[in-house]
Image (tube, coloured by chain):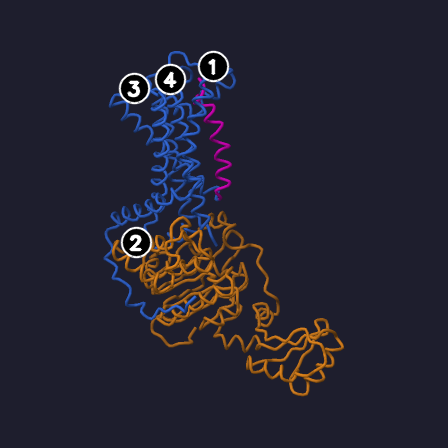
Chain colours: A orange, B blue
Amino acid sequence: MSTRSSNELVVVTHGLTKEFGDFTAVKEFDLEVPSGTVVSLLGPNGAGKTTIVRMLATLIKPTSGTAEVCGHDVVKESDTVRSLLSLTGQFAALEDNLTARENLLLMARLRGYNRSAAVRVTDSLIERFDMSEFRDKLVKSVSGGQRRRVDLAASLVVQPKVLILDEPTTGLDPRSRQVVWNTIRELVGIGVTLFLTTQYLEEADALADYIVLLDHGRVTAAGTSNELKARIGDQRVDVIAADVAGMEELARLLSTNFEISTSSEQRMISIPAPHDVEDLAKVSAALRGVSVEIDEVALRRPTLDDAFLALTGQPATETKHDEGRRTPELEESHS
Amino acid sequence: MSILTLERAPADYEVLPARPSSFSRFLRETWLLIARGLRTIPRVPTRLSDVTIQPIMFTLLFLYIFGSAIHIKGMTYQNFLLPGLIGQSLAFGVIGAGVATATDFASGVVDRFRSLPVTRLSVICAQVVGQVIEQILGIAIVAGIGLALGWRPEHSVTTVLALIGLILLGLFAFTWFGVWLGMVLKTSDAMQGIGFAIMLPLSFLAGTFVPIAGLKPWIRVLAEWDPLSSIVASVRHVAQGTNATGSWQLTHPVVSMVGWCVLIIAVCVPLALRRFRTTTAAG
């Protein structure tokens, strides 16, 4: 990837491959991540995102190929690599029966701070991440969004060269997701190199400089958000009429001003909306005073499914072999 | 929720001290992780009851219910039962250690520790030492109640030291067994179920509550070669000076207990270390 000229490559992988028995989780994955960028691995469950993350974080060994973090090999210099990166895994791995503050203190101490420095670092994180109100609550009794914040803060007791976030917003409600996004944007603002995995196109679009689309362990497409969007297609305004006759009448009306496509089964008219809300407003204005009954007018973003459909000609499918929890015995025999 | 402000971030970080030698790092990290485990004991009702209420209950129930019907020739039931209960507590350490290990793996906490620049051996050593400390607490409670209710072990210095030595050896062995089993079984539910299914019959067979000598011949053979029998017999031999009869392991209880423990350690430590290096939990 060469979206940004930089002399420092933080993550470099060559032909990175991981097999679990007969199953190839990741196949010849190549990537170069310059300092200060946000890279997002985007794909459905089982696409190989987490396997890549786990190889970078030195938790599993590649079957073949290499990966380096700041020039240090993840297998041969794993201890150095661990001191350069922070991993925030999928399940907000915190000790449930310690408080938010105790968890952060433990992480700070394990990173090597002495007691008083650990207290200072922890307290400044609590302040910055706005965690004062639940700092002394056991982690098992805080909300999902709060837990995620503690989790992120735990990865930031030192300033890592690379921060790896594995599906940081999966399972969060929209409000908590916004909070996590804001946090991530702030981190980007201070120059942290971010490696983010997600199942949400919207999330990759909102946060990443460079997006890698993964499917069945292979790279399907890669590029900046704009490059990918140009291939996927823009967002659109969908107008859904109450019945087919109504839809046909609306189609006649709208086709004079807009480029439309219709779907009779869904009673839906779609209009490309490159200018977001502006286009939505124009369509709404055109519909004002119309006597036809309308069920819905909405601005829609392309989803991960749309992206896969556009780029691979096939919808995204979850791989039956789900990476993670259920397969440690497979990992075992091969690492 | 307010918008977060992180502009000050770089300035807030403290300078990390130079990394000490690997051995002092190992000790420091192990201690930090042990402290983490111990701190959570009073906050988890089930774990707290495993080391407090459960041993108290066992002691009282067996002492007063079985004790009213069982008469041991030449000794009080207290003096027969308490060494048995201590042996059983050692063996049940497998379950506690396994459940704690499985829970840590399943929650991804172990993975997080392993992604830190922390010596990996410290993560598993902390697990073992933490569990041993937890079990010592339980055994101290059993012994304390026993003493209050009329248990009278021999009380020479050598007896006490020998007893402590045997208990520590047994705990160490069974805890490693539990840590390994916890990684193999992966979930705390499975560990709990299978752990009890294995340990409970072995413990009842081991002459913990009634003398092996009075059992029917076919079951007596099983009991005489139950590894836990050697542990119960050994604790009883050291604490009360009694000599059991029967199989070789019962007539040489201390030697066979040490043998069993060394065997368990020799098998389980390498297995557990290997498993720890290769098993990863959360995806």
Q: Is residue A172 visible?
A: yes
Could you classify mark 2 by the number of other residues whose Cα lies within 10 Å: few (under 14), some (14-19), or many (20 or more)?
many
Task: Say which residue label 4 marks.
Answer: B251
Identified by mark 2, the residue type is Arg
Disc 3: CA contacts within 10 A as few (<14), some (14-19) or many (>=20)? some
User: Given the image, what chain letter belongs to the residue carrying mark 2?
Assistant: A
Chain at numbered mark 4: B
**In whole angstroms, how far apart are the C-alphas of marks 2 and 3?**
45 Å
Q: Marks 3 and 1: CB-CB under 8 Å? A: no
- Image location of residue B191, percent across then percent down: 48, 39
The numbered mark 1 sits on a residue in which chain? B
- Residue A93 sits inside the magenta stretch: no
> Residue flagged by tag 4: what amino acid is it?
Thr
Pointer 3 chain:
B
Tally of numbered discs: 4
Q: Residue furthest right?
A: A245
Is B269 drawn above or below residue A117 in the view shown? above
Looking at marks 3 and 1 on the same chain, the residue that comes earlier in the sequence is marked by: 3
Gap in angstroms between the C-alphas marked 3 and 1: 25 Å
- Tag 3 residue: B154
Residue span colored magenta: B187-211
Task: Give me the disc on residue A109.
Answer: 2
* Helix, strand or loop under label 1: helix
Whole-number angstrom distance, CA of label 1 to CA of label 2: 57 Å
User: What residue did someone put label 1 on?
Assistant: B214
Quadrant assignment, res B47: top left
Q: Residue furthest bottom?
A: A256
Q: Is B190 contained in the magenta span?
A: yes
